[in-house]
Structures are given as C-alpha cells and as structure tokens.
Image: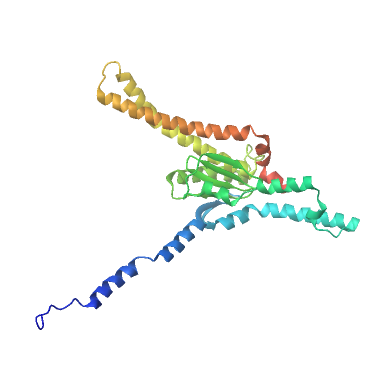
Amino acid sequence: MKGGFPQKTPKKRKNNFLYMHKKNFKTPNSLRSSLLIRRTELICLEFDIKGICVLRRISRAELLREARISMKEDLDRLQILHNSLASEKNLNKPLLKTMNEKDKQRLLQFFRGSLQSRDIRQVDPAFSAKPALWVRHNAILVSLEQIRAVILYNKLFLFDPDNPKVQRAVKIISERLGKIVERDIDMTSMPYEFCALEGILVNVCMSLEKDFASLEPTILENLDDLPTRLTSRQLEELRSFKQRLSQFSARSQDVQRVLQEVLEEDENMINMYLTEKKISP
C-alpha cells in the first residue's frame, strides 16, 4: 500500500490468463469450420472386387462421383449413338432437343432414381437412420442393424468402422466377396453386388440370432419358476424381459418389412443387377 491507497492488480496477469483460455478454446468460426469438415467427410471401409478392405476418408461428393461412373459411361454411349444417327440424318441439334417429351421424362426419372446426396444421410453415422434397403439405378443402399453400406457394381463402402457390429461384419463380408475370386461352384453365377448384400444380410441375421440366444434361456428359467415362486422381484424382472423382447421383436420385424418391400417391387429387383447393367446397359 502506497500513500494510503490500495494498489490495483496488474492487468498483465489478467491478460495472460485470458490469453491462455483463448489459446485453449476454439473460436466460433474455427468450431464451425471443424464441424463442417466432419459433416462433409465420412470414414468408411472400402471393399474391392477381391474382398480386401482399406480404411478410407471419403466426402459426399466423392461418393456420388464413384456411384455415377457407370452412369457417365451409359451417357457416353448414348451420345455416341446420337452422333452417329445425327451424322446420317444431318442433324445439328443437341441430344435433348432431338428427344420427344416422353423420352425426356423417362430420362429425368432415371436420374431421379440414381443415388442422390440426400440418400447419403441414411448411411451417415451422424444422423439417425431408419431400417432401409434402397435400390437405385447405380447403387444399393443398406441401413440394417447398425450396418450402413453403399454397394456399387465393383465396390462396397461400409461406414462407421469403429462400431463393434460393423467390425464383426467385416470378416463375413470379406469371406463372401473372396469366394468370387476363388471361383466357388455356388458363387460363380452371383455378381459382386449380390455377394456383398448376402454378406451384410448374413451378418444381420447372425446378430439377431445372437441377441435372441442371450434372452431365451433367462426368460424360460423365470417362467419355469413363476408357478412355484411369485415375488415382486420376479414380476419386475419379467416386465423388464417383456420390454427387451418387444424391442427385439420390433427390430426383427423391421428387417422383415424392409426385405419384403424390395421383394414385392419388380422394378427394385431389376435394378439390383448392377453388374449386368454395367456390362450390357
């Protein structure tokens, strides 16, 4: 104390304290940019034609570009055919102007039926997704039992690789895809997309079967003891088991419903042949 007046706390110390906090915490702009990067990039396992998988970071635009490669080749063939016909008939108009309205509507419907950016939310772990098996002209999108995947005619993208259920599915899918290379008797006529889809569905069924196997013995044991010993604790356990069994039943019914919807739609069944459309569009 000097001259009877208390001395103020030096501002330098306060500024250093604020500087340290500013250094440790990100500004709103940096947080916004980091969240934007997370939303535009997805981490996945990419399976090739031999069933070998690698960890990959892919953006939504890259995923759409991968899915539209086959469509681009189809458009190139269409353009070549148009050029040959135009040279024969001496037509100088662009392709779309030479098409009638009915053909234009069919072409627009074809592009709407291809993989869109909004479809990718179904396989993005950042979004909650309902059980689905969507068939597009150039891809098959799967979201079942925490397995989220996009299947192309020569590639499989499996998302959320840190999920334990996804990690268990990797081995099954690799084995199914590896049989294509081994020329197994039962697999020679099965194209890549069906082998990949089969591996995913086998894993989904095994996951449901494992969950039910863990519930069944305990429930049966409690039901056997129920006529001879009825307590409030047992009733509470039965109520809990009933809730878990209802949840399991809802999960299995969702899988059944999704598969049934695809099997009952002829257009979806035709569009699932991605390899055949690639070879002979």
Q: Residue furthest left?
A: 4
Q: Is residue 218 left or right of residue 255?
A: left
Residue beneath the point at 78% across and 45% down: 102
Q: Residue furthest right?
A: 89
Q: Is residue 280 visible?
A: no
Q: Where does the N terminus fall, quadrant-wise? A: bottom left
Q: Is residue 105 left or right of residue 246?
A: right
Q: Residue furthest top?
A: 227
Comparing 117 with 88, the one in front is 117
Give percent across and percent down for residue 95. 79, 55
> Is residue 134 shown above or below 70?
above
Give percent across and percent down for residue 21. 30, 68
Residue beneath the point at 48% across and 48% down: 127
Comparing 55 with 63, the one in front is 63
Comparing 1 with 258, the one in front is 1
Residue 256 is drawn in which quadrant?
top right
> Is residue 199 shown above or below 49?
above
> Is residue 263 shown above or below 119?
above
Residue beneath the point at 51% across and 52% down: 44
Give percent across and percent down for residue 125. 47, 49
